[in-house]
Structures are given as C-alpha cells and as structure tokens.
Amino acid sequence: MKILAIIPARGGSKRLPEKNIKLLGGKPLINWTIESTLGIPQICHTLVSTDNTAISQIAVSAGAYVPWLRPDLLATDEATTISVALHSLDWYENNHEEVDGLLLLQPTSPFRTRKSIEAGIAIFEKNGGTPVIAVSTAQDHPMWTLKQDGNYLTPFLGEKGFASRSQDLESVFVVNGSFYLSSPEDLRQNNSFFGPKISGLLIDSPLEAIDIDTPWDFKLAETLYQIELE
C-alpha cells in the first residue's frame, strides 16, 4: 500500500495571517502535521503544496517534500482544496509513481495524532479503498435544530424530533477536517473525497478535532495545549 500524503498550505490567510507557520507550542503550526506523518510505512511522501517560500523552507526543514511552489491559479481564495489535491496527485504520479491512496491532512488540525492517521489508513485498507473521512460526534443533534420561517422559528426537520428523548436519537457525526483519504480513481471520478460510500474515522478527542481558522481558534488551541502540559 502506497499513500501520498498532501498538506495544503497557502500563504494568504485573511482571518489569521500566516497561520500555517504561526508558532504553536514553540513550533510552526504546519510542523505538527508534517511530524505526525513521518515514519508511517504506507506513506511514500509527505508533499506540501504551497505558494509561499517561507512555508516551503519551514516544511522542508521539518522533513516534508516540497518539489515546487503552487501555480498562481491554485493560490487564490477561489481555488478549491480538491483542485489543489488533484494537482499534486497528477504531478506526483507523472513524475514518480502511481499510488494507492491520496491522504489530505490540513495543517489547521495540529493535534491529530499518528495513531489516528494509522487507524484511518487501516480502515482504508480493510474496506478496499473506500474513502475515509475523520468525523466527530455532533454536539447538537439536527433533529433539535430550528430554521427561520417568516417571523417565526420552525423545526428544521419537522416536529417529530422535538418529541424525541436524547437517548432515542440516532448518533450523528460532523466532519472535523483532520483526515481525508481516497483512492486516486475515486477522487478523479467524484472530484471529491465524498463518494457514494464513505467510511468514518471517529475522533473522540475534542483536542484532536480542533480546526484552526480564526484568532479565537488559535487562542483556544494554545490554551488547551497548555492545559494538556499541566
């Protein structure tokens, strides 16, 4: 099993400037993700896709593979994560070798563990290459949500949900953004990590499920990291 790990790390970030190399726990944010992949047997390379020279240099120092700077077309606010992933996959298979899986790891999930990565890969192998997505248990059940209906609020999914006891509700999950793994075939066919069938990698730890996108998220990550050290 050969898996190409890709870490997308664009230089521009409006809500949290330079977030991918902002220091968390004394090291650049992106280093947390790079280091978690090193030494996993199935991962043939950890490729960082970036348009930024500073990020590139830091990533290489941390042990990542950065063969180029991302094309300008893929460095805009409108560029999608899937287009960045496919660009990296196509380049790698054209210049190195074909792979069995593409693993997308966002640097904004710094506390994702090596153990979780290995567990996700094991699910991928066991289920014959079905896409694997990291999820967390939803804190708010959709059956108990509301929507605006004119001047009033109405149940989003109908009245039945509000008559249900919490213990009678089905378990529901949300994507936490820390792990996406798909075969190249599925990825190219669906143009998405979400195919007709998806396997879930359940992340129980709230710390591990953190996704940093704003100054508030970063402050929360710093605070929780310090608590974990105590």
Image (tube, rainbow, N blue to C red):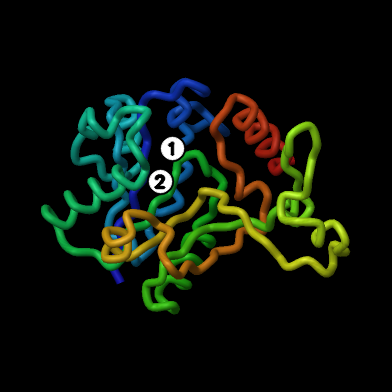
In the rendered image, which residue does mark 1 sit on? Answer: 30
Asked whether disc 1 touches disc 2, contact meaning CB atoms under 8 Å apart, the reply is yes
Q: Which residue type carries mark 1?
A: Ile
Question: In the rendered picture of this protein, how many numbered marks are placed on residues?
Answer: 2
Provide residue 172's location: percent of width, then percent of height.
Answer: 67, 61
Does residue 45 sit above or below 29 in this rendering? below
Residue 43 locus on image (x, y percent): 33, 61
- Snapshot quadrant of residue 173: bottom right
Residue 195 or 212: which is nearer the viewer? 195
| Relative horizontal placement of residue 204, taking residue 28 as reference (left or right) | right
Mark 1 element type: helix
Which residue is found at the position 67% from the left and 59% from the top?
204
Amino acid on which disc 2 is placed: Ile
Task: Identify the residue position indicated by label 2 in the image.
Answer: 34
Q: With respect to residue 222, does 85 lie above or below? A: below
Q: Residues within 10 Å of mark 1 (few under 14, many from 20)?
A: many
Q: Quadrant of residue 124?
A: bottom left
Which residue is pictured at 72% across the width and 50% down the height? 156
Q: Position of residue 29 (x, y in %)?
A: 48, 35
Q: Does residue 124 sit above or below 134 in this rendering?
A: below
Q: Nearer the viewer, residue 88 or 77?
A: 77
For label 2, the crowd category at 10 Å Cα-Cα, with few meaning under 14, some 14 to 19 and many 20 or more, is many
Q: Secondary structure at mark 2?
A: helix
Q: Residue at x 36, y 26 (%)?
A: 11
